[in-house]
Amino acid sequence: LAKTTQPISMDSYEGQEVNITCSHNNIATNDYITWYQQFPSQGPRFIIQGYKTKVTNEVASLFIPADRKSSTLSLPRVSLSDTAVYYCLVASGYNTDKLIFGTGTRLQVFP
Amino acid sequence: DVKVTQSSRYLVKRTGEKVFLECVQDMDHENMFWYRQDPGLGLRLIYFSYDVKMKEKGDIPEGYSVSREKKERFSLILESASTNQTSMYLCAGASGGRGDTQYFGPGTRLTVL
């Protein structure tokens, strides 16, 4: 089972780049890394997913080193609306595996 | 636009009551999940289902059961609610395995008195 560890909280200011790192030392060969965003009173929402190296979409980038034991979610030029909790999930496509969500990182963006 | 709906946003029950939490997805996904979310503990998987009538225990199945009679509907059952089951319950659906994108419902905040 790939247990994940994230910082509990982070602060930033509008317009800055924010990097949130997740550690997953026991990641398995078949595991993917997925990041979710959650606002208060809502369910988590998919942000980005990757297996190795770098993935970029319209809202974020995901950096995964060669050993895959950690990953970094990068949010460019954050705004107040990016204030949320961010979860790192390590999971595989096999039904017998368990889902391991991290406890999440609470990002607070200040004006 | 994909959608996962949960039967109630807020629910208050008494200790010992049988509680049903319903979840419906319109994405034709094989996989559905039930989580509970508590402060400081993140999301913990209770049960998941990878097909109709198929289920598998997650990390914290004690005190819960599930039912999946139709592909689009996944129910979480608390046979005899207890105060330590007061929590936020989240349902999700996914097309493939655990690594695939999960689509979450808005959650049900259950209070057991």
Image (cartoon, rainbow, N blue to C red):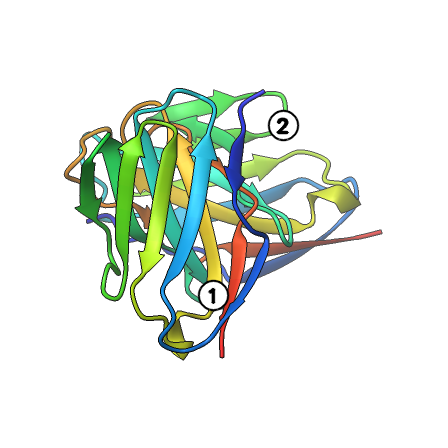
How far across and down, in percent of the image, does residue B53 sit? Answer: 20, 35
Q: Residue at horizontal 38%, vertical 52%?
A: B35
Q: Residues within 10 Å of mark 1 (few under 14, many from 20)?
A: some
Of all chains, the one bearing label 2 is A
How far across and down, in percent of the image, does residue A98 sit? Answer: 22, 45
Q: Identity of the amino acid at label 1?
A: Ser
Mark whose residue sits in front, 2 or 1:
1
- Compared with B60, A34 (above or below) is above
A38 relative position to B22: left or right? right
- Compared with B41, B83 (above or below) is below
What kind of element bears circle 1?
A: strand
Residue at the extreme left: A96
Is residue A65 shown to the viewer in this render? no
How far across and down, in percent of the image, does residue A4 sit? Answer: 34, 52
A58 relative position to B64: left or right? right
Query: How many circles with numbers are drawn on the protein?
Result: 2
What kind of element bears circle 2?
A: loop
Q: Residue at horizontal 46%, vertical 49%?
A: B90
Is residue B108 shown to the viewer in this render? yes
Q: Residue at horizontal 45%, vertical 55%?
A: B89
A94 relative position to B93: left or right? left
Q: Identity of the amino acid at label 2?
A: Val
Residue at the extreme right: A111
Q: Residues within 10 Å of mark 2 (few under 14, many from 20)?
A: few
How far across and down, in percent of the image, does residue A106 sit? Answer: 59, 57
Which one is nearer the viewer's eye here, B20 or A97?
B20
Disc 2, disc 1: CB below 8 Å? no
Q: Which residue is mark 2?
A: A59
Q: Which residue is mark 1?
A: B87
On the image, which quarter does residue A32 sit in?
top left
Q: Residue at horizontal 85%, vertical 51%?
A: A111
For the residues labelled 2 and 1, the Cα–Cα distance comes to: 31 Å
